[in-house]
Each structure stands twice: as structure tokens, then as C-alpha cells.
Amino acid sequence: MSDKENPDHEQNSWLGPLSGESTKSNPNSEQGETFIEEASYGKSAETIATSGSPLLGDINMVLDIPVQLTVELGRTRVPIKYILQLAQGSVVELEAMAGGPMDVLINGYLIAQGEVVVVNEKFGIRLTDVVTSSERLRRASWQHV
């Protein structure tokens, strides 16, 4: 269908690129006519890495960026006057249960839970439950609302 037959085409021709679609000229059509090609979404890093995509170089650039991994023992809320009364030997009761799973955070975002282990006389964590990528994205978008 040409622009003459579809008056909305000219007004909405800018929608394709903004919606993630690409517009290409069709060599078998009238001059100036375009068709919409759907963009592909949801490719994982593994798919891109194995596809020989030019994006692979970009992904490799971020693989060496350091992030803060934190294992959280527990939390509690206390008034400031309680904090001012703390002294050496004070015990702060946490909401987490003894022997329960510990939260594993990357830059403050929960990515897993695990149990404490000892490795060469140092503490470590054995992951028992890893948050899925879609759940991490959902939580991250919810936190910014």
C-alpha cells in the first residue's frame, strides 16, 4: 500500500524506529514505499556471545568491571537513641533466624541466598537459591517506581 492509499503512513512513519522496528525499502514496490520488519528481543548474553555478533566486544568490556558482593547476616530497625547507647559488648538482635539462609547482594540488589561454609579457614557462601534474571529485572524496576 502506498502513502497515497494510507494517509496515516506519513504521520506515523516515525513510530517504527522508536518501537524497536526497522524500516527497509522494498525493492519490488513503488518508489518510497517501506515495510516494517519486526525487531528481535530477549537475546541472552550467551546467545549473543555464541552468535558472532558485533555486540560481543561490548559485552566483553563489562565483564571485568568490579562489583560489590555482600553476604548479609541480617537486619533490624532501631531508634537513634538505641544506637547512641551501644558500647563494647552490646548485643544487637537481628530479624534473621539462626541457621537460616543469608542474602547475597550485588551492589545492593538481591541475587541469591545461601548458607555459610568455611573454606581454608575463611568464610564462604554456598548458594542454595539464585534469583532468576527476570525476577531481578522485575525487582529493580519496582524499586525505581
Image (cartoon, rainbow, N blue to C red):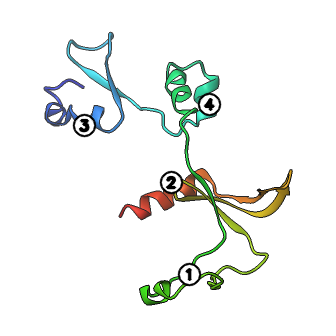
Vertical arrangement, residue 95 with respect to residue 108, above or below: below
Badge 2 vs badge 3, beta-carbon distance below 8 Å: no
From the image, state whether disc 4 or disc 1 is nearer to you. Answer: 1
The amino acid marked with disc number 4 is Thr
Where residue 62 appears, as percent x and y from the top left, is 52, 32
Quarter of the rendering containing residue 45: top right
Q: Is the residue 71 above or below the residue 1 in the image?
A: below
Between the residue at mark 1 and the residue at mark 2, the CA separation in whole angstroms equals 26 Å
Is there CB contact under 8 Å for labels 1 and 2?
Answer: no
Residue sitting nearer the eye, 94 or 131? 94
Q: Would you name the residue on which mark 2 appears? A: 137
Above or below, 82 relative to 57: below
Residue 47 shows which numbered tag?
A: 4
Q: CA distance from mark 2 to mark 3?
A: 26 Å
Q: Nearer the viewer, mark 3 or mark 4?
A: 4
Q: Nearer the viewer, mark 2 or mark 4?
A: 2
Residue 23, by quadrant, is top left
Q: Residues within 10 Å of mark 2 (few under 14, many from 20)?
A: few
Nearer the observer, disc 1 or disc 2? Answer: 1
User: Between marks 4 and 1, how big is the CA–CA gap?
Assistant: 42 Å
How far apart are labels 3 and 4 at the CA level? 28 Å
**Three-letter residue code for mark 1:** Thr
The local secondary structure at tag 1 comes to loop
Q: Write down the residue under mark 3.
A: 15
